[in-house]
Image (cartoon, rainbow, N blue to C red):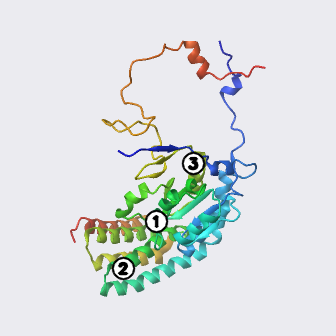
């Protein structure tokens, strides 16, 4: 059994935030939200650029589903998760999360299924194209469909 | 017998809202994607941080850790090369004081199954899931600023105590820490406290001159 040492250290962040001045939590949140609003259009453009890169990569993946190419798709989807919400496209972010789950399931099970990837890319494109025009029921139907695909891959039924 | 506090004190007025000053905080943001880094920078700039330091990968972050005293590190899990978990692991073992004890928050879009244990054991104060919202982020920052967790160092872990509440060692084990108490409560070894003693501990006192 290894020895365990407890170390008490001063909390540097605590000392800094206690200094006079500063913002209330509400003001800090409002300040951050205003800043994010200012870069929203950039984030929409980033979502489109990432989606284009995913589509291009998908062509390569169909012919060469190597672990390296799958990892590239995972990284693009992971990037999309963070940007889509700021672009006010949360459903696109949720679908991107599902892509990550799918690639992770492929890695864990040493599996591969091109159709599952194609379904996800089509779902992403649909959700992006519809934006906030799509109603909640239809959006959830698309996302549920993607989750079902991941579940099937995860349980190796494909 | 102790004096009771004035009646007004029993129903405290809301009072001024607490303020948190991040203006002079040295905050390091580590994020490989340009847009992700910009999002983080805008959030922390909105919180009042004047000049957040930026790094695109673990190597850049390590260089900053070695030359600048930091108050907070926010690091994406998915970095090219050395990932965010390994970076925080390096930070904790780096012996670069005081930065090896600096609060570290990992942000993650998706955590791969193979990295769940790594995430748990890397020594970060918090892991925050993306998409980020300013409210969640400021809550975590304030939480980290308020917390008083000791650091735990052993062969397999160096970082803030992962036990938020003192619940003692797992059942049927002795516990490895000097201050771990046995699960069974033993017989009292001191006389019981009087009611006055208990009152004196619990009731607010009026300051006497």
Image-based side of B200 in relation to A56, left or right: right
Q: Are marks 2 and 1 on the same chain?
A: no
Q: Quadrant of the N terminus of chain A?
A: top left
Image quarter of residue A138: bottom left
The mark that comes first in sequence, 1 or 3, is: 1
Q: Identify the disc placed on residue B67.
A: none
The residue identified by callout 3 is B143
Image quarter of residue B167: top left
From this view, report whether residue A25 is shown above or below residue B188. Answer: below
Q: Secondary structure at mark 3?
A: helix
User: Where does residue B127 sit, x and y in percent of width and height?
Assistant: 48, 57
The residue identified by callout 1 is B109
> Marks 1 and 3, how far apart in space?
21 Å
From this view, report whether residue B195 is shown above or below residue A150. Answer: above
Q: Nearer the viewer, residue B35 or B72?
A: B72
Q: Residue at x 27, y 66 (%)?
A: A154
> Marks 3 and 2, how far apart in space?
38 Å
Q: Residues within 10 Å of mark 1 (few under 14, many from 20)?
A: many
Image quarter of residue A147: bottom left
Q: Secondary structure at mark 1?
A: loop
Q: Secondary structure at mark 2?
A: helix
Q: Nearer the viewer, residue A118 or B101?
A: B101
Q: Subunit of mark 1?
A: B
Q: Subunit of mark 2?
A: A
Q: Nearer the viewer, residue A54 or B2?
A: B2
The residue identified by callout 2 is A68
Q: Residues within 10 Å of mark 2 (few under 14, many from 20)?
A: few
User: Where does residue A34 sit, x and y in percent of width and height?
Assistant: 66, 64
């Amino acid at each position: 059994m290894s020895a365990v040492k407890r170390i008490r250290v001063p909390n540097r962040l605590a000392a800094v935030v206690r200094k006079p001045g500063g913002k209330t939590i509400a003001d800090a949140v409002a300040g951050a939200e205003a800043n994010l609003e200012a870069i929203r259009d950039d984030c929409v453009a980033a979502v489109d650029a990432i989606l284009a890169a995913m589509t291009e990569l998908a062509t390569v993946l169909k012919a060469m589903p190597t672990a390296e190419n799958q990892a590239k798709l995972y990284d693009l989807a992971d990037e999309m998760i963070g940007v889509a919400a700021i672009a006010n496209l949360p459903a696109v972010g949720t679908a991107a999360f599902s892509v990550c789950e799918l690639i992770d399931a492929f890695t864990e099970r040493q599996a591969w299924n091109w159709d599952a990837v194609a379904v996800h890319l089509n779902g992403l494109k649909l959700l992006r194209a519809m934006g906030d025009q799509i109603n909640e029921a239809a959006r959830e139907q698309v996302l549920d469909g993607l989750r079902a695909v991941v579940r099937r891959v995860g349980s190796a039924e494909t | 017998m102790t004096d009771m506090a004035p009646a007004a004190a029993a129903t405290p007025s809301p009072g001024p809202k607490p303020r948190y000053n991040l203006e002079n905080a040295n905050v390091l943001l580590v994020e490989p994607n340009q847009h992700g880094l910009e999002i983080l920078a805008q959030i922390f700039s909105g919180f009042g941080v004047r000049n957040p330091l930026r790094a695109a990968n673990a190597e850049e972050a390590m260089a900053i850790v070695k030359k600048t005293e930091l108050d907070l590190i926010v690091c994406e899990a998915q970095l090219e090369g050395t990932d965010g978990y390994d970076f925080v692991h390096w930070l904790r073992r780096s012996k670069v004081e005081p930065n090896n004890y600096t609060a570290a928050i990992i942000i993650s879009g998706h955590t791969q199954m193979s990295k769940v244990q790594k995430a748990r054991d890397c020594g970060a104060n918090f892991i925050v899931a993306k998409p980020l919202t300013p409210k969640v982020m400021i809550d975590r920052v304030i939480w980290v600023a308020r917390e008083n967790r000791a650091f735990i160092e052993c062969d397999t872990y160096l970082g803030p105590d992962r036990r938020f509440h003192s619940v003692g060692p797992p059942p049927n084990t002795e516990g490895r820490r000097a201050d771990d108490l046995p699960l069974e409560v033993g017989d009292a070894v001191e006389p019981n406290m009087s009611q006055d003693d208990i009152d004196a501990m619990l009731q607010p006192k009026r300051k006497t001159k």
